[in-house]
Image (cartoon, helix red, strand yellow):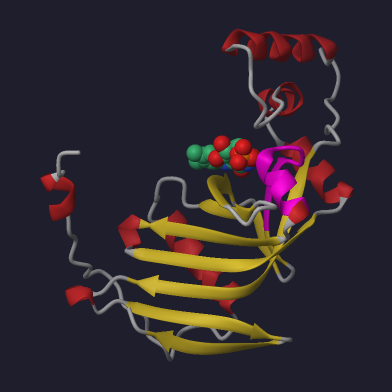
Amino acid sequence: MTKHKDIASIRTDFLKHHIDLSKLNENPLLQMKEWIDDAIRLEHEEPTAMSLSTVDKSGKPHSRIVLLKGMDGSGLQFYTNYESAKGRQMSEHAHVALLFFWSGLERQLRVEGVVTKLSEKVSDAYFASRPRESQIGAWASPQSQPLKSLVSLEARFNDYAQKFEGRDIPRPLHWGGYNVMPDYFEFWQGRPGRLHQRVAFTRDNEKWNREILAP
Ligand SMILES: Cc1cc2nc3c(=O)[nH]c(=O)nc-3n(C[C@H](O)[C@H](O)[C@H](O)COP(=O)(O)O)c2cc1C
């Protein structure tokens, strides 16, 4: 393979922000909320997009993007198809890793934790708030399954659109939310001269222990 000179020479000097340890929230969930709010305020594209890594039965990791749809004292929430590849992996292995990268803020946030399914009531409420097309899509798409063709998916979509015409669309039982109860956070702030700041929080029962890591 030819060496890609341009990629190897891409290098950014990070200058914009720094972490003031005395101002960092002792609760990493609240600190995360501040960073998400910064990303939203700065109109970062897809500020809530996060990579979700899961592990399958054989120990192989798999990553993909999902959208954070809520956060509160119990953790971080997202929605998907329970029978998708990720859904199957999380039923076999409940530990997951999440990753945000906000390039405009020169920030990375790592979160690790354990997933549980959200209650049916919470999933129903979120499903009901989604646009109708997304609701039909949740019925029509057998997420992660091989498809004969794109046309076959469109046909399924049209069938469900017809089936539900003129009435509210119920949540399919194979679709719903997960809560990630975090046990690790790492806030990374890019700094000049590669002296980036890394602040890690590890959960010890109800308490969070904080340490600074070498970049
Ligand atoms: C910006 C963006 C947001 C996405 N949000 C979601 C989401 O919230 N839920 C979801 O199931 N898939 C979402 N996807 C699609 C997933 O990345 C993935 O393709 C899909 O969930 C199937 O993954 P799996 O086969 O590993 O289960 C998103 C993709 C992108 C690029």
Asked if the magenta segment contains residue 177, the reply would be no
Closer to the camera in the image, 138 or 27:
138
Q: Is residue 24 above or below residue 70?
A: below
Image-quarter location of ligand 1: top right
Q: Quadrant of residue 17?
A: bottom left
Report whether 64 appears left or right of 173: left
Rendered location of residue 88, percent (x, y): 74, 45
Closer to the camera in the image, 60 or 196:
60
Report whether 179 appears left or right of 55: right
Rendered location of residue 163, percent (x, y): 84, 12
Closer to the camera in the image, 135 or 209:
209
Q: Is residue 119 above or below residue 75?
A: above
Q: Quadrant of residue 4?
A: top left
Report whether 177 appears left or right of 146: right
Q: Residue at x 83, y 26 (%)?
A: 169
Asked if the magenta segment contains residue 85, the reply would be yes
Q: Residue at x 39, y 57 (%)?
A: 102
For the N terminus, give its image quadrant.
top left
Q: Residue at x 48, y 74 (%)?
A: 186
Rendered location of residue 153, percent (x, y): 65, 15
Rendered location of residue 125, percent (x, y): 81, 44
Q: Is residue 141 above or below residue 24?
A: above
Q: Quadrant of residue 74?
A: bottom right
Q: Residue at x 80, y 54 (%)?
A: 117
Q: Which residues are magenta?
A: 77-91
